[in-house]
Amino acid sequence: MKMIRAVIRPETESTVTTALVEAGFPALTKWDVTGRGKQQGIQLGDQVYEGLAKCMLLLVIHDDQVGKAISTIVQSAFSGNPGDGKVFVTQVDDVYTVRSGKSEL
């Protein structure tokens, strides 16, 4: 299994989560975060904002679904502007259900 962490613009969160549900990925965790990319924030006039509002989505899916999930996220989060986001994929070694204590792998 793989874990996908997608950091996206907060204004695209609804579009991305709807697209994920439609693509067959209804289970996810999301939360509001702050961060910055290579541009190190944004300057508006004299004011510099180093931490920008973002939304992080977390999904754990089977290996054969990774391409479809990433494609769905990238296409639905794309605006063409800097700061659209990043998608990170990592290996999941094990998964446990809290209620039963059993491994799902």
Image (spheres, grey):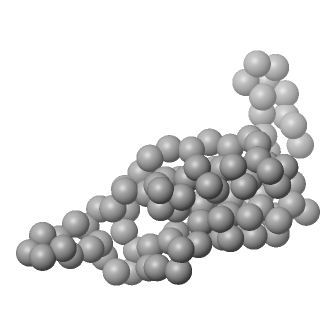
From this view, report whether residue 6 is shown above or below residue 26: below
Q: Position of residue 36 (x, y in %)?
A: 36, 68
Residue under the image location 68 percent in, 58 percent down: 4
Q: Is residue 57 left or right of residue 102?
A: left
Q: Is residue 73 left or right of residue 52?
A: right
Residue under the image location 44 percent in, 79 percent down: 82
- Identify which residue, 95 or 10, lies in the foreground: 10
From this view, report whether residue 51 is shown above or below residue 98: below
Q: Which quadrant holds the C terminus? A: top right
Q: Position of residue 92 (x, y in %)?
A: 75, 53
Does residue 92 show up?
A: no
Does residue 8 show up?
A: yes
Say which quarter of the image contains residue 72. bottom right
Q: Which quadrant holds the N terminus? A: bottom right
- Identify which residue, 31 or 9, lies in the foreground: 9
Q: Position of residue 57 (x, y in %)?
A: 59, 51
Q: Is residue 47 left or right of residue 31?
A: left
Residue under the image location 59 percent in, 60 percent down: 6
Say which quarter of the image contains residue 37. bottom left
Q: Position of residue 90 (x, y in %)?
A: 70, 62
Residue under the image location 65 percent in, 65 percent down: 76
Give the total number of marks visible in the rendering. 0
